[in-house]
Structure formats: structure tokens, C-alpha cells
């Protein structure tokens, strides 16, 4: 019997904020799920930079059947939309990859950066599926501020992050869990609606200042 080697990566996992959808509640549901022995996945918290994640995969000798990357991301869809995409890759310009690497080392946690950098270093198996929850980029900060407001109105002091899931987030977590479980068990074949995602469909880089090195690289590649 073939033992499927599957990794579920929670990209942008926040272990200290229970109400955030890519957080403890989702992880606990995945760990408590009834997995067939031959399909039990390894669940990884990917709440650090893409470079370190790539290096971890490079250091491992395990050959994977598939990877499921779960993340909250803003792709301009209605809030709360859960979508699944199969990564098809695609070569990117060296400078475009370098820009992703630069953003990654500044501490930005990004699913798209991880996809590009992982593709560049050839770490992905034949099947990589993303399970994406549409949230605005400000969602994490908004959640923390909302918890502070609840505490203030109740004239109480509690630890931010320990409040239970709001009903909307509860629904989001459950949908993400269900899609992730199906993807881990059956791959793209087990999902009713899977889009493709290539390197030229990714969200543009954040609007940050790149260092002089990037400018010098661009000038060096321009013809005289």
C-alpha cells in the first residue's frame, strides 16, 4: 500500500491569536481530523520567511506526493471567499525573483513570494495546491483592534488573541478546513472547483522601498 507523503503548510500562521483564521483553531481541527493511515499529512506552521522554508525543504530527503499551502491573501475577491488553486509555476525573470527574495528577507510573510522562491529553487513536487481565504491585508490588525475595543467596552482586561472565534471567522475556518482536508486526501481530483495559478498571475509585490542594490542591478542589465 502506497503511503501518500503530503505536507500541509499554514502560511502566515499566527499561534497567539485564536480568532485569526490561519491560527490555532484551524491547526487543531486539522490535527484532530480522522486521517486514513496512508494519507495522514504532516502539518507545518509556516509563519517565517520563505528562504528558511525553502532551506528546510532542501535539507529534507523526503520525496513528497503533494503540498497544500493554506493562507489568507487578498486577491480582490469578496471577503471570506475560499478558493483552491493548482500551482503551474512558470519561469520568472531573475530580477523579479530577486525582488521577491528581498521582500522576503525584510520579514514579509507572503504566499506568493514563497511560491516564486520555491519554484526558483525547485523544491515543489508535481502537485502543489493552494487553499486561499480572501482577507484584506489589514485583517489581522483589524482583528486585534476589534478585540481591544470589546475589552474596553466591557471595562475588562484580557489577553488579546484569547477571545473565541467570531461567527464569521468560525465559518471561514470551517470552510478552509474542509477544502484543505479534501485537497490533502485527494489532491486536485478531489476538489470540485480548482483554478490554475501561474507565476504571471500572482499579486504584485508590496509597495516598499527596495535598496540601492536592486536599482544597480536594473541599470546593469540595461543595454548601453
Image: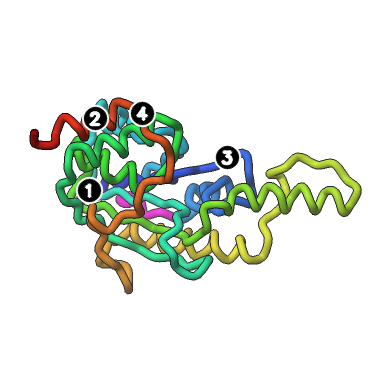
Q: What is the image's colouring?
A: rainbow
Which of the two marks, 3 or 4, is nearer to us in this view? Answer: 4
Q: The magenta stretch spans which residues?
A: 34-39
Cα distance between the residues tagged 3 and 4:
31 Å
Cα distance between the residues tagged 1 and 2:
15 Å
Q: Which residue is mark 1?
A: 65
Q: Residues within 10 Å of mark 2 (few under 14, many from 20)?
A: some
Q: Are marks 1 and 2 in contact (CB under 8 Å)?
A: no
Provide residue 104's location: percent of width, then percent of height: 38, 35
Give whichever of 44, 143 is nearer the camera. 143
Circle nearer the N terminus (2, 4) = 2
Q: Which residue is mark 3?
A: 15
Whether residue 48 is situated above or below residue 158 in the rendered picture? above
Numbered circle sitting on residue 211:
4
User: SS for tag 2?
Assistant: helix
Numbered circle sitting on residue 58:
2
Cα distance between the residues tagged 4 and 1:
38 Å
Amino acid at each position: 500500500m502506497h503511503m501518500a507523503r503530503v505536507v500541509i503548510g499554514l502560511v502566515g500562521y499566527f499561534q497567539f491569536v485564536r480568532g485569526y483564521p490561519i491560527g490555532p483553531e484551524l491547526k487543531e481541527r486539522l490535527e484532530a481530523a480522522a486521517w486514513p493511515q496512508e494519507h495522514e499529512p504532516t502539518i507545518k506552521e509556516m509563519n517565517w520567511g520563505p528562504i528558511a522554508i525553502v532551506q528546510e525543504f532542501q535539507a529534507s530527503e523526503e520525496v513528497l506526493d503533494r503540498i497544500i499551502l493554506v493562507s489568507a491573501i487578498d486577491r480582490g475577491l469578496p471577503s471570506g471567499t475560499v478558493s483552491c488553486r493548482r500551482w503551474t509555476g512558470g519561469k520568472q525573470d531573475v530580477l523579479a525573483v530577486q525582488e521577491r527574495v528581498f521582500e522576503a528577507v525584510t520579514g514579509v510573510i507572503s504566499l506568493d513570494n514563497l511560491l516564486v522562491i520555491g519554484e526558483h529553487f525547485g523544491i515543489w513536487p508535481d502537485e502543489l495546491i493552494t487553499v486561499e481565504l480572501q482577507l484584506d491585508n489589514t485583517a489581522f490588525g483589524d482583528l486585534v483592534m476589534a478585540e481591544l475595543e470589546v475589552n474596553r467596552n466591557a471595562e475588562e482586561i484580557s489577553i488579546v488573541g484569547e477571545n473565541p472565534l467570531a461567527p464569521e471567522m468560525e465559518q471561514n475556518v470551517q470552510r478552509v478546513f474542509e477544502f484543505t482536508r479534501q485537497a490533502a486526501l485527494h489532491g486536485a481530483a478531489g476538489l470540485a472547483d480548482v483554478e490554475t495559478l501561474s507565476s504571471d498571475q500572482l499579486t504584485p509585490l508590496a509597495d516598499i522601498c527596495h535598496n540601492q542594490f536592486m536599482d544597480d542591478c536594473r541599470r546593469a542589465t540595461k543595454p548601453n
